[in-house]
Image (cartoon, rainbow, N blue to C red):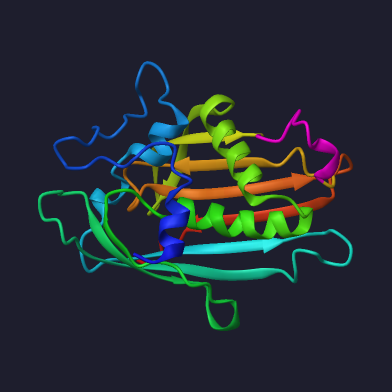
């Protein structure tokens, strides 16, 4: 596993289960009480429903209306996973994953991941997002990372929802948090202290991650940052 692969996994709020026997059962959307954000995003064996030989594709978009373009020009690209059988045959949910993160000059080194039961696209998205945000804010990436981690652990709302996949409506969970709201460093956030992170997961979707979004707007509705990743169900 590469150094980047190790660093992105540090975003996880809890370690992935060691084996299929230890893995928690898939969280049911119709449960009496909603699960925690940490359970949904970092503790579920999300790759269990992706067979070896499969390809997962995620559409990625980043754009910003901040003058002088500190985030760079709009970027519309893809992240592709080539899924292979895991080395550890004892863990039925684990997979080896080769990653193509963006294309051409936009390419970012990532992976490969070995024996992964969880979906690394969450950590890949957040790590890439944090690099750009820390550069624009001239902030310590670790500080921002810890704020997001704490927001997901202590300040996230989890609600049941529905998403349409393959022409049918399926159960899903929506996780939302505003980790920088009320932060001591608000004045250094360039108006982006209202940054909202939204995750949508669905047990019936391959890899379970439907979408991830980081969004911040001005009080007048101007777009400071829109960064989004969506499962491409047409790509297979």
Quadrant where the C terminus sits is bottom left
Image quarter of residue 143: top right
Q: At which x and y percent is residue 187?
A: 86, 39
| Residue sitting farthest toward the bottom | 104
Residue 185 in magenta stretch: yes
Is residue 170 visible from the viewing direction of this image? no
Depicted 184 relative to depicted 65: above or below: above
**Measuring 64% from the left and 51% from the top, which residue is drawn there?**
141
Q: At which x and y percent is residue 41?
A: 42, 40
Is residue 192 visible from the viewing direction of this image? yes
**Measuring 22% from the left and 53% from the top, which residue is drawn there?**
94
Depicted 76 relative to depicted 45: above or below: below
Q: Nearer the viewer, residue 137 or 100?
A: 137
Quadrant where the N terminus sits is bottom left
**Measuring 55% from the left and 83% from the top, which residue is drawn there?**
104
The residues colored magenta run 179-189
Q: At which x and y percent is residue 135?
A: 73, 59
Q: Nearer the viewer, residue 102 or 233?
A: 102
| Residue sitting farthest toward the top | 32
Q: Nearer the viewer, residue 165 or 67?
A: 67
Give the dominant element type of the magenta stretch: helix, strand or loop: loop
Image quarter of residue 182: top right
């Amino acid at each position: 596993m590469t150094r980047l692969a190790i660093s992105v996994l540090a975003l996880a709020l809890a370690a992935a289960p060691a084996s299929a026997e230890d893995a928690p059962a898939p969280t049911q959307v119709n449960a009496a009480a909603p699960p925690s954000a940490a359970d949904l995003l970092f503790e579920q064996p999300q790759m269990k429903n992706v067979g070896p030989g499969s390809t997962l594709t995620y559409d990625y978009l980043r754009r910003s209306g901040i003058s002088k373009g500190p985030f760079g020009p709009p970027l519309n690209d893809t992240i592709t996973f080539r899924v292979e059988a895991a080395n550890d045959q004892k863990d039925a949910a684990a997979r080896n994953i080769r990653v193509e993160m963006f294309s051409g000059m936009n390419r970012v080194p990532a992976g490969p991941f070995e024996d992964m039961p969880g979906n690394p696209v969450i950590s890949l998205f957040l790590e890439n997002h944090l690099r750009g945000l820390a550069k624009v804010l001239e902030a310590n990436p670790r500080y921002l990372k810890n704020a997001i981690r704490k927001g997901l652990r202590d300040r996230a709302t989890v609600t049941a929802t529905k998403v349409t996949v393959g022409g049918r409506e399926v159960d899903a969970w929506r996780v939302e948090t505003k980790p920088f709201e009320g932060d001591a460093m608000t004045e250094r956030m360039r108006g982006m202290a209202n940054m909202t992170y939204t995750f949508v997961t669905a047990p019936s979707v391959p890899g379970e991650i439907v979408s991830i979004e980081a969004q911040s707007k001005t009080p007048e509705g101007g777009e400071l940052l829109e960064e989004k990743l969506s499962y491409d169900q047409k790509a297979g």
